[in-house]
Amino acid sequence: MITLTSDFGSPYPASMKGVMLQRTDARLVDVAHDLPRQDVRSAAFWLREVLPYFPPATHLVVVDPGVGTDRAAVVVRAGEHLLVGPDNGVLLPVARLLAADADEGPQVFEWRYENPESSTFHGRDVFAPSAAAVHDAGVEGFTDLDPVAPTDDYVDLFFPEPDVRSDGADGEVLVVDDFGNAITNVPGEVLDGRAEVAVNRERAPVEPAYAHVDPGQRLVTVGSHGNVEFAVNQGRGDEAFGVDVGDRVSLSW
Amino acid sequence: MITLTSDFGSPYPASMKGVMLQRTDARLVDVAHDLPRQDVRSAAFWLREVLPYFPPATHLVVVDPGVGTDRAAVVVRAGEHLLVGPDNGVLLPVARLLAADADEGPQVFEWRYENPESSTFHGRDVFAPSAAAVHDAGVEGFTDLDPVAPTDDYVDLFFPEPDVRSDGADGEVLVVDDFGNAITNVPGEVLDGRAEVAVNRERAPVEPAYAHVDPGQRLVTVGSHGNVEFAVNQGRGDEAFGVDVGDRVSLSW
Amino acid sequence: MITLTSDFGSPYPASMKGVMLQRTDARLVDVAHDLPRQDVRSAAFWLREVLPYFPPATHLVVVDPGVGTDRAAVVVRAGEHLLVGPDNGVLLPVARLLAADADEGPQVFEWRYENPESSTFHGRDVFAPSAAAVHDAGVEGFTDLDPVAPTDDYVDLFFPEPDVRSDGADGEVLVVDDFGNAITNVPGEVLDGRAEVAVNRERAPVEPAYAHVDPGQRLVTVGSHGNVEFAVNQGRGDEAFGVDVGDRVSLSW
């Protein structure tokens, strides 16, 4: 099984599928192709949110603002999963999670490529062929492939850490989802036992689910990712709370 | 085969796919994930429009404004099809159609679940696992699954009935599709033999297909669903006729 | 394998999938369903861009402003590929490319259909069943199917030719992609060895890839399709260069 994630919109992902289907019979499963454009951190967040629900698979990821420069291509082994994508850190946060139960953490390899057909579409010309190849070689065999070489010299990425105190927490909005839920880096546990909190000094109720407030009303909840999120029942939390991706947010109680 | 329908946008549907692929080898087919948000009636309309074209399958449907409340999860058997989703009526109109040629109408079962991982994403934590389980158990075997129990206590949903008279018909716009076609609940037969009708007292031609009028011109036609729809050739019927979902419309001749 | 391409948005493509899955076990692969509405030339461009990366397959294409008129349905054989769609020229540019290495060029057949269920959704009622049938019959057998008849009377389509001279080139913007890259019909070779060119008399740098200029800066590059395109690193080239689909553009050096 190969999953596909990109910020390509349409129809470029189909070219990647064609390239892979020339080379492998693997099942192809789309994760998303409408991730925020060239936003490596958002992509890393969504991969960490979604991929751990998959069985062992090869994951092709192309959010690649550095396409056509000398940035490397990497293959990351994380437990029984393989991840293929550009060397910009996008694969690492999810790789750490996928390897959490394995004997060792993520292992990073360079995929050495030469003269791709284009300098603007490495998803098609570099990453799709490499994903098909490492998939068919498998987690035990892919290191025997000629272009694969272990490396310690790669770009890593970490999400900002929240500051959790006894009287509140300072954090950041990591992403806003399609519903308008503003998802922070603050762990949901800080809401345990609380009926309301102040978000940037304005009070809002803490509720277990959207429908616990009336349509159009604000709430603070723990999203499916386990983090604090700002939401509106049947509306957009980002607008109601006046926050956007990257904004610092202050919770207090 | 399992079909997937939701209002989740992206990338949440991929989490549901991962959960199912952990449990089953079934083919997964997306119906839509961009249905109008938390609009149970629109979803019920589109399911009734699309699912009857499928071979026997399990259909996972998550349009679920009541997620995290005490609303039940249900499994509906309709002929050789199984439907899985929240107990809000969304499954029933299509189930009646899918069961039309079977010996009996839709049979509704509760899927009893406890303590899902999240209270905001039952698509991933309740419905995807249950869809995988009932799919693999099959239409004959799924009633043996522990969480499945027959029930008569479920939410049903009916579309509003039009008022068809000898001199006209009063109905309602049920949905507007991506092309801007405004689809009503008035059966297409009322247009038989007519060259024009009045829509809210303004005359418009009745045509068999969009290209029978010039680009930009209005027409009244029978859509692929068999209902009266208001359209514009290469344009948006909803705007040209000034109607939106839920609006009452009056046809006269 | 059957690929699907349309301008249907959602959820109509699912009806086509259901119809095909009633008739065939073929793998279904979406190319795109959000192509510019009823824009035959854009669709022809994207098909020519994407389908050559696929292994031999049947390609269902429905961009069909003439639905419900007397326009024919056609099946085109191009090497080991089959294409199915409306007789409006959309299939021909890619068919010429797919047949480039075959012994002969594209061969066009009419698919004779009668009284489809609807006059507005031939994707579901005419093209999906015919795609399933020709797929299962194969490139050698599909001509034995009853509805298939060879024809010389079909609509063809050619992209406009650019005018390339020693001091510049005049061309046209064929499409704008989801990133905002404005893709012309001018072959990329004209940029060989140039550091900058004038686009409609305004100078812009020639670069091999987006990230070779700062974010927000304009560049002229050779896209993955091999043509000259106008782009902005992490921005929209169509807006920065003030061009849109169909605009004439003048390059000079």
Image: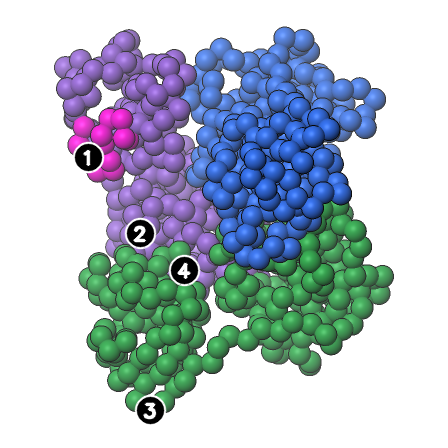
Chain colours: A blue, B green, C purple
Quarter location, residue A23: top right
The reply to whether discs 2 and 4 touch (Cβ–Cβ < 8 Å) is no
Query: Circle 1 — which element?
Result: loop
What amino acid type is highlighted by mark number 2? Answer: Gln
- The label shown at residue B166 is 3
**Label 4 crowding class (10 Å Cα cut-off): few <14, some 14-19, many 20+?**
some
- The label shown at residue C247 is 1
Residue at 46% x, 13% y is A69
Residue C167 in picture, x, y percent from top left: 14, 15
3 and 2 marks on the same chain: no
Q: Earlier in the sequence, mark 1 or mark 2?
A: 2
Residue at 36% x, 89% y is B165
Determine which residue is flagged by label 4: B177
Q: Which residues are magenta?
A: C238-249
In the visual, does C191 lie left or right of A180? Answer: left
Determine which residue is flagged by label 2: C38
